[in-house]
Image (cartoon, coloured by chain):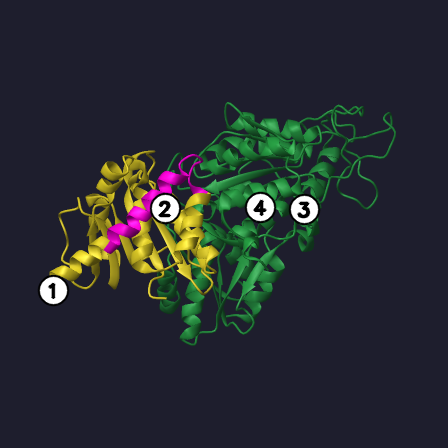
Chain colours: A green, B yellow
Amino acid sequence: MGEETFKLMQGNEACVEGAITAGLNFFAGYPITPSTEIAELSAAKLPRVGGKFIQMEGEIASISAIIGASLTGKKAMTATSGPGFSLKQEGIGYAVMAEVPCVIVNVQRGGPSTGLPTSPAQGDIMQTRWGTHGEHSIIVLYPSTVREIFDTTIKAFNLAEKYRTPVILLMDEVIGHMREKVEMPNREKIAIYNRKKPSSSLEKYLPYKVSEGDMVPKMANFGEGYRYHTTGLVHDETGFPTNNGKIAEELINRLVHKIENNLDDIVDYEEYKLQDAEEVIISYGSTARSAKSAIDVLRKEGRKIGLFKPITIWPTAKNQIEDLSKRTSRISVIEMNMGQYFLEIERIAGKYSKVDKYGRSNGELITPKEIVSFIKEG
Amino acid sequence: MKYSEFRLSGSGGQGLILAGIILAEAALQNGKNVVQSQSYGPEARGGASKAEVIISDDLIYYPKIENCDVLLALTQKAYDKYIDSLKPGGLLILDNMITRKANRNDVDVYSMPILSTAADKLNKMMVANIVALGCICELSNIVDKKYVEKAVMNRVPHGTEELNKKALIEGFKLVKDKKREMYYEVC
């Protein structure tokens, strides 16, 4: 290994590198701290690889633009932070309903509203799950190192393409802005998934028909000759609206189950020193880094403690978390909010294990020292 | 390593985040693990700004610094805010315009004309960050000078390479002059 394989890279930069590796060729966005570098670097890099960057007039326009681009066959992404993410909910719901693959990055900052623009927070956990209205499932990924941002961005694109769904890549100000040493992988060895295209004749194509045993319809590009209609209304196989309750039920079921029935493929997580652990910390994003440091300190003092770090936040790693709850006596959920993911973990693990929470919302990353004293107090 | 946690503080627009990035990159090329992070206010200029760099032989998880081994302060405001965060036995590098000082007999103090060297000697206030970087590297010996110079060249805007190289050398020189001066004081 030569020294040149190691780079000093920023989190937001790794997101753009990962996206381009995954095939990103259309970015529309409206710059907002702390995600701005993603737009800046996309603007600088995309034209060099034959892609397009456009700065839109606002957040809703940005997500609308990537939905349109994706329908024509592009791999599309937008990036924002809390205030913009709130605005994008309308488009996210549309992309869920019309089954349009796209990636929405939310580099979290303090909220509500414009909040603490330059400070980190993890207050959007529940918003990523239920921010857009109506019954639906959603895929949300949340890396915690610069290298993991690169890998997870690729995974976000792959899952979006595979399941024809918007994927939300959550980050926070700490990991978006920090720089660290990364070893870049050999790009030729990275698996890239592209949406399945129809093989039927132009006349016979039904844009929302799924073949037997499959849950994801084949996707033609707008403009290449296949005729189809896209709408946010409940629709049948042709893509045209219907009020038929049976069709509505089938559609919503399929939209939910194409994700919830594939947990093994979608759920990603990291375990740290869990093998002999009697108690567990569950933490994600930048807070998981503090948790690892805290665990190293506690281990030195003889405590058998480890970390379960979900990388896929939604759908939840419910099987793994339930297993953990059966073999450990205490689970502490540590997050930069007042206990959002705690609710989900308590729901899954509360039957078998004591579930505690530690969190705060003052715009500062939780320190290892705080975690150590929290664990010791309990 | 004697020093591992570096805090570079001053006001927004002084280029401290860039100085932190360069320090981190130089240490990385020197074979170390590094994390660089920053905090700043909503304003583009003015306001408090700090860059933090952790340099270690071990893996680095928690990316922030609570108490630092090396503190650079370029403004009185930054000095007042962060002086208590410097660990005992640490290294304090401050601009000599900072006059109101805390009573810290437990740290090594180097007060030097960083800002005026940039403004008067190099005629570019903008390179004060690189002068300061030169001081940090000369005093801490954290990284080989060849890697610092390479990282400066790699990260400064095109067309300013020579000026920044001069600024770095002026930074090294400030420390040598200061040490000579301190030696005479002792004699």
Q: CA distance from mark 2 to mark 3?
A: 45 Å
B171 or B82: nearer the viewer: B171
Whether residue A165 sits left or right of residue A143 in the image: it is right
The residue under label 3 is: A259
Answer yes or no: are tags 2 and 4 on the same subunit.
Answer: no
Label 2–label 4 contact, CB within 8 A: no
State whether residue A140 is above or below residue B62: above
> Residue B19 — which label?
2
> Residue A148 — which label?
none
Horizontal and vertical percent position of residue B76: 19, 45
Label 4–label 3 contact, CB within 8 A: no
- Mark 4 or 1: in front is 1
Amino acid type at image mark 3: Ile
Q: CA distance from mark 4 to mark 1?
A: 66 Å
The residue under label 1 is: B187
* Range of magenta residues: B155-176
Q: Residue at x 77, y 39 (%)?
A: A196
Considering only order in the chain, which callout, 3 or 4, is on the residue closer to the N terminus? 4
Of the 4 image quadrants, the one containing the C terminus of chain A is bottom left
Q: Residue at x 42, y 58 (%)?
A: B62
Q: What is the chief secondary structure element of the magenta stretch?
A: helix
Amino acid type at image mark 4: Val
- Mark 2 or 3: in front is 2
